[in-house]
Amino acid sequence: MKPPAFDYLRAETVGDVLEGLAQQGGDARVLAGGQSLMAMLNMRLAKPKLLIDIMRLEELRKIDRKADAVVIGAGVRQADLLAWPELAEALPLVALALPWVGHMQTRSRGTICGSLAHADPSAEMPLALVALGGEVLLRSAKRRRRVAAQDFFAGMMLTARSDDELIEGISLPVIQGSRVAFREVARRHGDFAIVACAAMKTATGVRLAVGGVADVPTARDWPPLQGGALDDVLNAFAYELGARDDVHATARYRRDLVRMIGRDLIGEVLQ
Amino acid sequence: MTRLKADARHSVRLTLNGKPVQSEAEPRMLLSDFLRHQIGATGTHVGCEHGVCGACTIVVDGMLTRSCLTLAAQVDGCEIQTVEGLAPSADRLGVLQQAFRRNHALQCGFCTAGILMSLDHYLARNPAPTEAEIRDLLSGHLCRCTGYTPIIQAALEAAAQLASSKKETSDA
Ligand SMILES: Cc1cc2nc3c(=O)[nH]c(=O)nc-3n(C[C@@H](O)[C@H](O)[C@H](O)COP(=O)(O)OP(=O)(O)OC[C@H]3O[C@@H](n4cnc5c(N)ncnc54)[C@H](O)[C@@H]3O)c2cc1C
Ligand code: FES
Ligand code: FES
């Protein structure tokens, strides 16, 4: 199908974006890579009056390495981050998860921040943000604020972003020498995950984050458990996530994946 | 800042396979429709119109792009490559196209334009791909006829041929 009618604004400064969002609020949408938004428009699942194209803003197209964090601007495409030479060393979990986001033909256009704004419960970048405990940098004409990953995702395709806010970028912590693992099960590589899991060794034990099951990516911290004790917490976690049946998989299959992949990944990072 | 009104048509200029073209589009017009209906470049096919099938894949400013997920207005001033630009001349096929023909890598041909664009873009940057890499690239395309095996075969054959032809020119 074809998109409904809207005005198109090609922003030349961040000020243009903030002004457009302030004036039209909920009737305006930021257009980043378009890999989710354009599909929604074509299917008429969204009917904005104004699209604000942010992809000609050089100032948003930055990957900024700080002492203990990497700040990724709203204009950074998924392919740009994958090609960043420091990725595997600075953000090893993102390096593992990002190749699972869509296909080469969608990563070339889609942005990191667009994926977070879209907030699909099965998406890999929201999972990585929650697993790493990153922050989302929001900006409106009136104020700037930082929202922690676990407070940002509010439900299926719902976030703490208000209508007049641009996601200017995200900040992901660089955790020196951390051990990480990632695994996903999807019908085909590049499809949205049925279950995706990320694990990380922490100072006190281990963290497991799961996407594709609950409405939002969800993380849990545990001490370094093994054997039956580990199986018990994983089983409890799998049930807490409230899996549902859908056309891709049953709730039971999803719980099974959480238990099995969870155990494998935790074993890997604690090794 | 440029704001284009919803109900008006606006000029869009771009370079298509090296040649400047210009036409008009409402903001909501998809690039796939702009190419096919406004410019008359019907080599780019439209399957699903939501980014899944890959039939509409083209190259915009060096980036593989689903033209059905892109607005004509977004690419004003950009360089675009489509399947019409692959053959060296009107009566000759390019190396990749010849390999498709030899290997029966197309039947109805609906998916072919997009697959050729992905492979052409990929092989130019990755001259010695593995089969696994070609399969990964092709995950972004659906073909309902060939079963993919001949497509993978054609891609690997074209890569080998392109690599050896490059060697010959550089030796000469
Ligand atoms: C075939 C296909 C397969 C895919 N598979 C996957 C997959 O496996 N995993 C996955 O995670 N994704 C997948 N995607 C979606 C992914 O490709 C998108 O890139 C991503 O979801 C959105 O990023 P975008 O830059 O394209 O954003 P857009 O589509 O431009 O925008 C998406 C939403 O976010 C808003 N938005 C974007 N940027 C900002 C910003 N800076 N501030 C405020 N709001 C903003 C938009 O207004 C819109 O509501 C797939 C897409 C396709 C077409
Ligand atoms: S028509 Fe664009 S991906 Fe199917
Ligand atoms: S050749 Fe018919 S869909 Fe691919």
Image (tube, coloured by chain):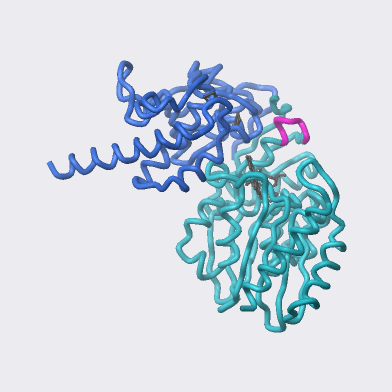
Which residue is located at x 38 percent, y 39 percent?
A: B156
Residue bounds of the magenta highlight: A40-45
Tell whether B100 sits left or right of A131.
left
x, y (%) of residue A263?
71, 69
Residue furthest left in the image: B172
> Quarter holding the C terminus of chain A?
bottom right
> Quarter holding the N terminus of chain A?
top right
Among the 4 quarters of the image, the one containing residue B3: top right
In this view of the protein, which residue sits in the foreground, A189 or A257? Answer: A257
Q: Which one of the lettered chains is coloured blue?
A: B
**Position above or below: A243 against A129:** above
**Position above or below: A111 against B109:** below
Among the 4 quarters of the image, the one containing residue B8: top right
Which residue is located at x 61 percent, y 25 percent?
A: B47
A44 is within the stretch colored magenta: yes
Which residue is located at x 84 percent, y 47 percent?
A: A245
x, y (%) of residue B88?
30, 25
Which residue is located at x 39 percent, y 47 percent?
A: B129
x, y (%) of residue A150?
78, 65
In this view of the protein, which residue sits in the foreground, A26 or B35? Answer: B35
Tell whether A206 sits left or right of B107.
right
Q: Which one of the lettered chains is coloured cyan?
A: A
Task: Kindly tell me whether residue A145 is visible in this rendering.
Answer: no
**Position above or below: A113 against B164:** below
Tell whether B20 sits left or right of A164.
left
